[in-house]
Image (spheres, helix red, strand yellow):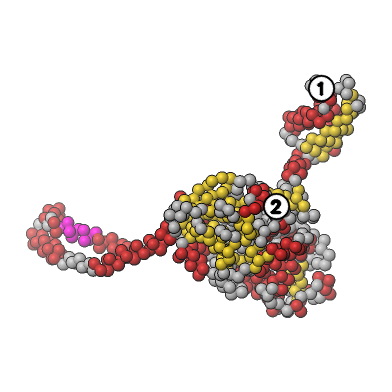
Amino acid sequence: MEQENQGINESTSQENRKQHYKNPNQNSNSNKSPNTQSGNRSKNVSKSSGSRRRQSTPIDEKLKAFVEINQEAHKQRLNPHYKLDLNSKEKIRITPLGGLSEIGGNITVFETQNEAILVDVGMSFPDEDMHGVDILIPDFSYLREIKDKIKAVIITHAHEDHIGAMPYLYKEMQFPIYGSPLPLAMIGNKFDEHHLKDCRQHFNPVEKRKIYKIGEDFEIEWMHMTHSIIDSSSLAITTAAGTIIHTGDFKIDHTPVDGYTADLHRLAHYGDKGVLCLLSDSTNSYNTAPTPSELSVAPAMDRVFAKAEGRVILSTFSSNIHRVFQAIQYGVKYGRKVCVIGRSMERNIEVAMQYDYIKLPKSIFVEPEQIASMNDKDILIVTTGSQGETSSALFRMSIGEHRHVKIKPNDLIVLSSRAIPGNEGSISAMLNHLQRAGARISSDKDIHVSGHASIEEQKLMLRLVNPKFFLPIHGEYNHVMRHKETAMMCGVPERNIYVLNDGDTVEIAPKYMRKVKTVRTGKVYIDNQNNHKIDDDIVIDRQKLASDGIVVIVAQIDGQHSTMLSKPNVTSFGLVADKQDKHFAKEMEDVLEHFLANIKEGLIENPRALENDLRQVVRKHIYRKMKRYPLIVPHIFVM
């Protein structure tokens, strides 16, 4: 600031001197000094100042020419137009069927004139009002339409929101599956659970940094990427129209636990060649600070185990193998044996050890049955349930229903995860149960780090890839819009950015990007107890039952006279209190009598139409009196 002020003062002084040189009498007249000698001194000072003015530095025309040459080189380097074949008439279409305006359910179709590939086939979690629904999978209607064009399913990584719907797709249709080993191994476990072992024959494991020809129209390279699950990848999808980079879920971790950093060199390689379009993870678009390294949780883990006086029960996402690996390492450091509880946690650790992603001696593990006979200070329990899922092991421990683990007052519960939006209520309820049982809770910020890129990492990705067109993906609408702003800061023109919705099909060519159509999308409800779909109307009925109740009316009608043969049997649930049942039944009897007295001619001969009309009459009556729309179930027997 001092330098700025000094510069301002110097320039002001210089300007004053110039003015004074042009009009030397101005200051003397204004000051009206009686001393003429003083005025003469002013003139002399002014003249001497003018004579001391610095001469302009001579310009070296050769240097100036190279400035222009370098500026043009920068334009060539940063402007992707120069790297694309603008004369090409080739194009590619991109259609997300899930993963936008939501967290999860990621699935995207890349489609040329004759062929198509799918990138990821993920699931998402239901809202609280989707009663009896365990998971949501994408609507595959559009895939059924283009089934004959699809050449392969391409997998970026093994998170549930990217592979969770694979068994449901492969029950209907099968395609070759390409991915790195860990994602394929976890998909294989899912196929086994769903009795689809034969579908393992479609596996095609890939080598990263190697280009695979898929069909006639696609060439794909898997590039290693850091994330909250190991063996993640970004994709370079090359077609006749140009190269598309799909980041998958990512963060830029310079010190990952396994030492395998993100392959920024290959991203830069494609960016230097020219990238038609970038699809990039938007989940952490509001985080201004760089996402911390997974290795940064190590000191916090060390403190936890150093201070723990009883059992340590650690709960995190079962897919975060490196988090679990670090916890186990520090548990062993402080002389603890490890007990893994929870089906998904057991399966993921087993797979990671089988394929040498992590190396741990089997002697450190104990079975849940052994815990009761061991000293509390010698035990580390690694389990699922950090999101408060009622079926999880930790939740069952919290309410005293777990077969092997009962919470004790000296237990330390370590929650090494963040709350997924929508799960805050269930997590809070579980914490209340745990604390009532006397356990201490540790959920410090430094014991968890995100697996998604912050703004600065998103900027790095944009600058490395330097795409002509940009499609922000993976996140809620506000995340995607914030990512759009970041892209504009990094030089992508607003006209070259499109904010997609599920079902939007954008067509991209070297000269343009435009929306061409919208296809059918949506969610299919799944009951995990039997791995079957739940029809939409069943879920709607459950929502009505939960919010407005149900009224069942059973009546016998004289078909000749349109009168009741006896009092109707009226049963209601969730609408009126038990003590008002008789009054409500009498009210429904009156409504039915009035309905029969004004019945349309010939309606009595059509039982289904009769029940439908009665349903409408009863619904209107109840809404007028109670402002509710209960489920109305009439059973009319015409005698």
Q: Residue at x 60, y 48 (%)?
A: 503
Badge 2 is on which residue? 136
Q: Toward the viewer: 181 or 436?
A: 181
Residue drawn at the location 74% of the way across and 55% of the way down? 171
The reply to whether the magenta stretch includes residue 628 is no
The disc, 2 or 1, on the residue closer to the chain's N-terminal end is 2
Q: Secondary structure at mark 2?
A: strand
Identity of the residue drawn at 76% across and 60% down: 196
Q: Is residue 558 visible?
A: yes
Q: Which marked residue is nearer to the observer: mark 2 or mark 1? A: 1
Say which amino acid is labelled 2. Answer: Leu
Q: Amino acid at mark 1?
A: Gly
Q: Nearer the viewer, residue 250 or 51?
A: 250
Left or right: where 21 falls relative to 158: left
Q: Residue at x 79, y 67 (%)?
A: 408
User: Which quadrant of the view contains residue 54?
Assistant: bottom left
Q: Quadrant of the C terminus?
A: top right
Q: Which residues are magenta?
A: 12-20
In the image, which disc is placed on residue 602?
A: 1
Position of residue 163 in the picture relative to residue 542 (left or right): left
Q: Quadrant location of the N terminus? A: bottom left
